[in-house]
Amino acid sequence: MLINIVNLPFELVTVREIKVLGIGLGDPIESFPIQYVDTADPEVSYARRYQGDSIFRINTDETETEIPIATGMDEVRMYGGWLRSKGLAWHFADGKIDKFFIRAPHLDTLEVENLEDVLKKFGEPERRKMGRTGVELHYLSKRLKVAWSSKSKSIEHIGVGNFAVTPQTQIEDAAKGIFHVGGLRSVSISALDQFKVYRGLITGIPSAEMNDRILAGIVSRVKNRFPEYSAPYLIDPIRTSIETAHTDRFRKGESLPKYACVAQIDSIEPAKNEKSDGSGLVLIWFQEALAMPIAPPIQEEIERMDWEDHAIDYFY
């Protein structure tokens, strides 16, 4: 084993002092111990294929040329790219390391069994986002990223360097229907139906009593449509009082937002049964315009939702 991950100083304010194989962030490619390099993968646009620890350039006549590690390192120095070594990967930009990854088997000594163990070891993250198989915890002040896999119940990788999740990233996630519920759980919209609330109202104005009937009807229909789920989760809509003159009389009414939205929302993490493959629920909310995007107040309600209480577990 090239490193012992347990001994790395993750409690540091920054990760400037973390070095693997004697090198760390900002070090030049010339300081890299070439004897450890398995693969040098430059960021150039030629076609290539991978076989074992070798990279083959695909030439225009469809022949292949193996790229020697020394040649690959020269190109990484010139164009940027990756050097890899048995579960470790370093990214170079402008001839210097700007980030690196640590993967298994170097993470086996961390001895974490669940996400709670990860949080005890690394603390609460400043940002989180949905990853390929679970959730990514971003410690911006430490320039550290921890990717937790909900499938394998293990840390998939640890990233050191520039992995910042910006507010813009959070906005982009929301635009894709990805949210972070109750702190760290990532959930995503897998299906979305929308319709006008007053599509059958031709004349007159809606009233509070009419809106009560509309809400009860929507919840009932959704429950019948998705019997495998528990009761749908309803985000109470804003009700707006309206007044209008009609034949010398003022009529008081009440309106709901223009559109009703019904979404199936899923998480790759269980809600209650840790042996399940995932969890989900059906969500109902109302907003003035068609989604996407989802109205910001609704996004906030989704992120405050008690997922474990309302979602059901399922098995593939």
Image (spheres, rainbow, N blue to C red):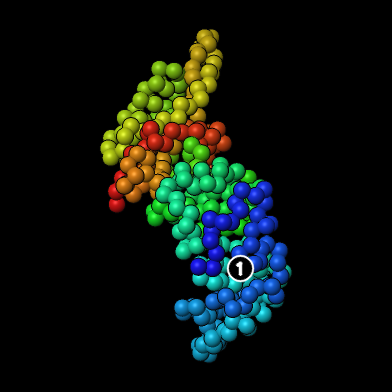
Choose top left, top right, bottom left or bottom right for residue 206: top left
Residue bearing mark 1: 21
* Vertical arrangement, residue 223 with respect to residue 10, above or below: above
Residue 155: percent from the left, percent from the top?
A: 47, 55
Counting every numbered tag in the picture gives: 1
Crowding at dot 1, Cα within 10 Å, few <14 / some 14-19 / many 20+, comes out as few
Q: Nearer the viewer, residue 309 or 204?
A: 309
**Residue at the (52%, 46%) spot, across then down:** 121
Q: Nearer the viewer, residue 104 or 259?
A: 104
Q: Nearer the viewer, residue 211 or 266?
A: 266
Q: Give the amino acid at mark 1.
A: Leu
Q: Nearer the viewer, residue 306 or 195?
A: 306
Q: Is residue 176 visible?
A: no
Q: Is residue 35 visible?
A: yes
**Residue at the (50%, 62%) spot, across then down:** 106
**Residue at the (46%, 33%) spot, across then down:** 305
Say left or right for 287 vs 276: right
**Residue at the (42%, 22%) spot, across then down:** 211
* Vertical arrangement, residue 50 with respect to residue 167, above or below: below
Residue 225: percent from the left, percent from the top?
A: 30, 38
* Vertical arrangement, residue 250 with respect to residue 94, above or below: above
Q: Secondary structure at mark 1?
A: loop
Residue 26: percent from the left, percent from the top?
A: 71, 63
Residue extending furthest top?
249
Say left or right for 125 vs 236: right
Residue 75: percent from the left, percent from the top?
A: 66, 78
